[in-house]
Amino acid sequence: MPADFRPIVVDNGSTDGSAEVARSLGATVVSESARGFGAAAHAGLLAATSDLVCFCDCDGSLDPRQLPLVTAPLEAGDADLVLGRRTAVKRDAWPLPARVANWELARRVRRRTGLKVHDLGPMRAAGRKALLSLNLADRRFGYPLEMVMNAAAADWRVAEVDVAYLPRIGKSKVTGTVRGCVRTVKDMSEVLAR
């Protein structure tokens, strides 16, 4: 973790001992019994106490040392929400079906909101109190999309910065299974339908 960044890891029912590893390395570990990406992300948001908060997957695909790139536009007063636009460092880092789905989703968001976003990736940053004011309700895979849609509805300035996207460690619950892909599409479609 970069200096001045305090990691909060949300244990969402993991059985691989990762919570203990995170705790032994100095992270604050929060348990969230309600399953789902959004439930875990929101639990981390509620546990945070800093003015600015960041989100970052813990599967090795994103390097937390790049978080200062994501927070820089916030600290400069140039944005209210900053998304890390993933740039794959290896061809297999981001499977083609996932890239195509993300491209299509970003296209729909641009068309609906006018935001100039190209990636709805998991590395992002915003003000804590402002995020809480968005009243995010989705507790599954629609959470990151709902954040962007609600931010657009609130006239937030949304920016993107390029971040390196690395091959993940382990199997993805989203892109690694047909069930995960279907569930994610369903969750995000429900958010777009609102």
Image: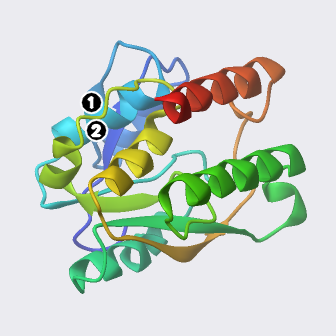
Q: Which residue is at 30% across, 34% downward?
A: 136
Q: Nearer the viewer, mark 1 or mark 2?
A: 2
Residue at the image position 28 percent from the left and 68 percent from the top: 80
> Residue under circle 1?
30
Q: Which residue is mark 2?
A: 44
| Marks 1,2: beta carbons within 8 A | yes
Q: Nearer the viewer, residue 50 or 9?
A: 50
Please report whichever mark, 1 or 2, sits nearer to the chain's N-terminal start. Answer: 1
Q: Quadrant of the N terminus?
A: bottom left
SS at mark 1?
Answer: strand
The image position of residue 192, as x and y in percent, is: 54, 35
* Rendered position, 148 above or below 69: above
Left or right placement of residue 100 versus residue 120 in this view: right
Q: Amino acid at mark 2?
A: Gly
Q: Position of residue 90 (x, y in %)?
A: 84, 67
Please state the horizontal and vertical placement of residue 139, each as a whole percent of the image: 40, 24
Q: Left of 3 or right of it: where is 124?
A: right
Return the mark for residue 11.
Answer: none
Query: Is 105 left, or right, of 161 in this rendering?
Result: right
Choose between 92 and 156: the one closer to the eye.
156
